[in-house]
Amino acid sequence: MNYKRIFLQALLLFCEQQNIDIEKLASISGFKVQDLFSAKDFSIDHNKLELLWRNLIQNSGDELIGLRFGATMQIAALDAVGQIIQTSNTVKDALLQAASLIHLFTDMFSMQLIDNGETFSIVLKKNKKFKNYPNTFNQMGDFLMAFTLHELDGLLLKSLHPIKAEMPTFKAEHLPIYDEILNCPIQKKESYLLEFDNKYLNTRIITANHDLQKLLLKHVESKENSYEGKKEFSAAIFNFLTANSYLFSISVEFVASNFNMSVRTLQRKLKEEGVSYIQIVEEVKKSLAIHYIQNGSSSVKEIAHILGYAETSGFAKAFKKWTGKSPTTYRKQNI
C-alpha cells in the first residue's frame, strides 16, 4: 500500500473543498492529478513535494493550511486506522502503533511517546537531513500536530484539551487559529510537542471492541451485493461503507479517494442512479444497527458509538425511526 500517495490524494481532495484548482496546482508542481489517482506506479520526489506545499501556500494565501488540513482529515483516509483499532485497547497502545506507522506517509518526522508521570507528551522529532525542504517540513509538522489531536478526540469520543503545545512555526498573529484547533497554551520551541494529563493514557478505546468487529465481518460476508433495487455504483458504495464501518468516522472524501474520483464525481454518479450519499450512509447504519442488536452482546451505548453517534439518545431515536421500536425492545423481541 502506497501511503504517501494516499496522503497526497487526501490533501488534494481537501484542497478541492477549499475551492483550489487542483489541476492547476498539480501542474505547476510537476505532476498530474489523473496520475495521482490512477497511475499504479505514481511517485513524487521531495523536490516536487516541496514545490507543491509552496504553491499551495501561495494559492490559498494560508500559511496554516497544513494545520487546517490536519484538523479535518480522518486517520481512515490513511488506511492505517484498521491496524490501530484492531490492535489497540488503550490510548497508549494506539499512540505506540501510530509512532510505528508514521514513516509510512512521511520520512521527515518520527513520533515519540514520553510518560512524564502526571502527564505524557507526544513529541515529533525532525529528520534533519530534510532541512532543505522548509515548506514541507513546516506544513507536515503543523499537520501532524492537529491530526494527532483530532484523532485522539475521535478515538476517545470526546474533546481533549492538551496542557500545552510547542511548535517551531508558532506566530503570535495566528493565535486565534491555534486556539481554535489546538485549544491550549502554545510556545515557540525547537520541536513539536503536545502534553496531556496522564489520566488519558490508559483510557480504553471503545472502537477496539473485537466482538463487534467479528460481528461486522460476518455481516459483510452475508450482505455482499445486497443493496437491493439499486444500481451497480450505489451497491458498490453500500458494500464499501459496510465493510469499513468499524472506522465509524469514515468520510466521503475517503470513500471518493478509494474509488479514484473526486467527491463531486462520486455525488454526481450517485445522483444519476437516483440516490444520495447520505441515503446510503443511513441504509448502512440501519442494516448494521439491526444486525448488532440481534446478534451482539454489546450494550446499546457501545453500538451507538461504533456507528458514529455522539449520544445514545440520538441512536435510539434513529433506530426507532427505522424499526418502530427502541433498541432494547427490539433486542428482547428478536433474540
Image (tube, grey):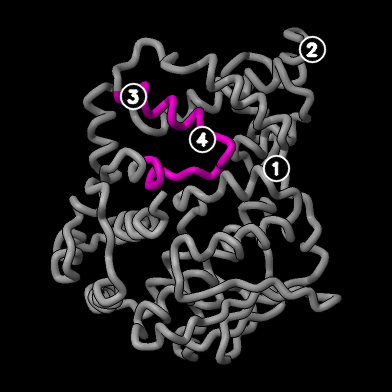
Mark earlier in primary sequence (4, 2): 4
Residue 196: image x %, image y %?
Answer: 73, 72
Query: Residue under circle 1?
Result: 208
Mark earlier in primary sequence (1, 4): 1
Task: State left or right for residue 280 relative to residue 46.
Answer: right
Bounds of the magenta segment = 233-255
Query: Residue under circle 2?
Result: 332
Amino acid type at mark 3: Ser
C-alpha separation, residue under disc 3 versus residue under disc 4: 16 Å
Q: Depth check: 237 or 59 in front?
A: 237
Residue 250: image x %, image y %?
Answer: 49, 43
**3 vs 4, front mark:** 4
Amino acid type at mark 1: Ala
The reply to whether callout 3 and callout 4 are in contact (CB within 8 Å) is no
Mark earlier in primary sequence (2, 1): 1
Amino acid type at mark 4: Asn
Quarter of the rendering containing residue 100: bottom right
Task: State left or right for residue 286 relative to residue 185.
Answer: left
> Can you see residue 126?
yes
> Can you see residue 320?
no
Residue 254 in the magenta stretch? The answer is yes
Residue located at (58% from left, 58% from top): 151
Q: Secondary structure at mark 3?
A: helix
Residue located at (26% from left, 77% from top): 47
C-alpha separation, residue under disc 4 versus residue under disc 2: 28 Å
For label 1, the crowd category at 10 Å Cα-Cα, with few meaning under 14, some 14 to 19 and many 20 or more, is many
Residue located at (44% from left, 45% from top): 251
Task: State left or right for residue 167 relative to residue 209.
Answer: left
Mark earlier in primary sequence (3, 2): 3
Query: Residue under circle 4?
Result: 244
